[in-house]
Image (cartoon, rainbow, N blue to C red):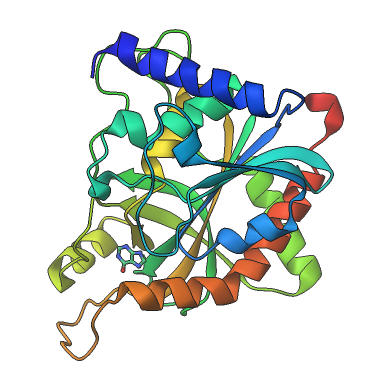
Amino acid sequence: MIMTDSIARINEAVGYIKGVVPQARPLVGIILGSGLGRLGDKITEQTVIPYGDIPGFPVSTVLGHKGVFIFGKLGGKPVVAMQGRFHFYEGYSMDLVTLPVRVMALLGVKYLFVSNAAGGINREFEIGDLMVLKDHINLMPNPLIGPNMDQFGTRFPDMTCPYDREFTQRAFQIAEEEGVRLRKGVYLATSGPSYETPSEIRFFSKVGADAVGMSTVPEVIVARHCSLRVFGMSVITNKANMDNDCAVLNDGADVVQKADASAKLMTMIFEKLIESIDNEQN
Ligand code: HPA
């Protein structure tokens, strides 16, 4: 797709949304991963917009994903949450995968909270653990390939610190206060949709990955390109299999079920972090 088409598509979506929720000034954008949609229930004063109603928006088809924007309040702040995201493995171009991030940025969002279900590579991780992203390894195509959209950001955006240090620190404070265990680690993104072979998992482990998944990194790169502050969390839904043990197979339904059990905790952390955003800084 040529750039002018992409920009027209973004603007058309923004125009439609502003028509439906003219008063909405979301400060925080939230992307809910597989099985993590229940955070949406905590949002008050809701206006729900199905992606299918928005001109230019694709409709997500995957298990555990709904396909709506929820505008409203969480932790006392105006937010917009995406229940359902677009995955590269569904066949969408990177422009479409990341379209909602640019739309949220133009709606005024300054912070992006991302979540996903991921396979644990770090052997200390248990199923159901929550991992705060401290960094990522991108093995997908870069979503910024193509002419640079100068109105959003620079040609060569810095990626030294993609995940906000302050939010990370605060998340660990909250976990300590609440007596819950949080992990911290590096998220490696593959295109999927096939799960990894044991040799691939051993390789990812050697290069420093703690968890693996098929999403999030494109949205984070585009968010950093337009200077949003990012906080990310994975729910470890399975142990990525390094051992060629053919009795332990990956299964998408399992991913959704395990994510649900930890979604409550993640929701609490997101809510408290959003509550802690200093109004003076906005
Ligand atoms: N691999 C890739 N993506 C995933 C996994 C996994 O093991 N679990 C949840 N998403």
Which residue is at 43% across, 37% downward? Answer: 219
Q: In the displayed structure, would residue 28 be above or below residue 31?
A: above
Q: Give x and y (percent) for residue 220.
A: 45, 37
The residue under the point 13% across, 69% down is 199
The C terminus lies in which quarter of the figure? top right
Q: Is residue 127 visible?
A: yes
Viewed as shown, does residue 168 lie left or right of 174? left
Asked whether, in this view, residue 179 is left or right of residue 127, the answer is right
- Residue 217 falls in image quadrant: top left
Among all residues in the image, which is located at the extreme bottom?
247
Choose between 150 and 257: the one closer to the eye: 257
Residue 118 placement (x, y as % from top left): 40, 64
Q: Residue at x 49, y 35 (%)?
A: 53
Which one is nearer the viewer's eye here, 268 or 156? 268
Is residue 223 or residue 4 the one in the foreground?
A: 4
Question: Is residue 14 left or right of 208 when viewed as pictured?
Answer: right
Instruction: Say if residue 223 shows up in the picture.
Output: no
Q: On the image, which quarter does residue 70 sit in?
A: top right
Residue at point 73% right, 28% down?
24
Which quadrant would residue 239 be assigned to in this image?
A: bottom left
Quadrant into which the N terminus falls:
top left
Q: Is residue 212 left or right of residue 158?
A: left
- Work out whether residue 176 or residue 214 is closer to the camera in this orientation and state it: 214
* Residue 247 % position (x, y): 20, 91
